[in-house]
């Protein structure tokens, strides 16, 4: 599991930062608010990770490990269906 997490961090490092920077620059015309918005994005991401870890532990404690594992399938399916093609201006098609 640690290897999968390491691969995730390696592939996502800089991706969120660049998206936040591009959006702040596009919306405000300046990069002055970048640190504010990347801080907010990091705070939300960290909070979601804490909540999901606690919820996963509660589910695993309440049910078997097999049930906890299968409980993730709807979320995996939902995230797989979220891909959209984008137009050159960044708007969803």
Image (tube, rainbow, N blue to C red):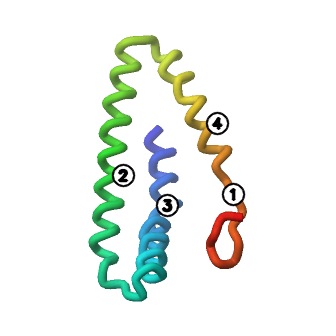
Q: Which residue is mark 1?
A: 84
Which is nearer the N-term, disc 3 or disc 2?
3
Res. 62 image quadrant: top left
Query: How far apart are labels 2 and 4 at the CA level?
Result: 20 Å
Which secondary structure lies at badge 2? helix
Query: How far apart are labels 1 and 3 at the CA level?
Result: 18 Å
Query: How far apart are labels 3 and 4 at the CA level?
Result: 20 Å
Callout 1: few (<14), some (14-19), or many (20+) C-alpha neighbours within 10 Å?
Answer: few
x and y percentages locating residue 74 in the rendered image: 59, 30
* Nearest-to-viewer mark from 4 and 1: 1
Res. 48 image quadrant: top left
* Nearest-to-viewer mark from 1 and 3: 1
Q: Residue at x 39, y 27 (%)?
A: 56
Query: How far apart are labels 3 and 2 at the CA level?
Result: 13 Å
Circles 3 and 4: CB atoms closer than 8 Å: no
2 up-or-down from 31: above or below: above
Q: Which residue is mark 3?
A: 12
Which is nearer the N-term, disc 3 or disc 4?
3
Which is nearer the N-term, disc 2 or disc 4?
2
Which secondary structure lies at badge 3? helix
Q: Which residue is mark 2?
A: 45
Q: Residue at x 45, y 79 (%)?
A: 27
Placement of the C terminus among the 4 image quadrants: bottom right
Which secondary structure lies at badge 1? loop
Circles 1 and 3: CB atoms closer than 8 Å: no
């Amino acid at each position: 599991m640690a290897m999968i997490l390491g691969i995730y961090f390696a592939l996502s490092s800089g991706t969120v930062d660049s998206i936040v920077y591009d959006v702040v620059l596009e919306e405000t015309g300046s990069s002055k608010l970048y640190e504010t918005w990347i801080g907010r994005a990091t705070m939300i991401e960290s909070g979601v990770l804490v909540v999901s870890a606690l919820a996963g532990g509660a589910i695993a404690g309440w049910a078997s490990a097999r049930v906890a594992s299968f409980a993730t399938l709807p979320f995996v399916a939902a995230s797989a269906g979220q891909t959209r093609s984008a137009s050159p201006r960044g708007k969803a098609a």
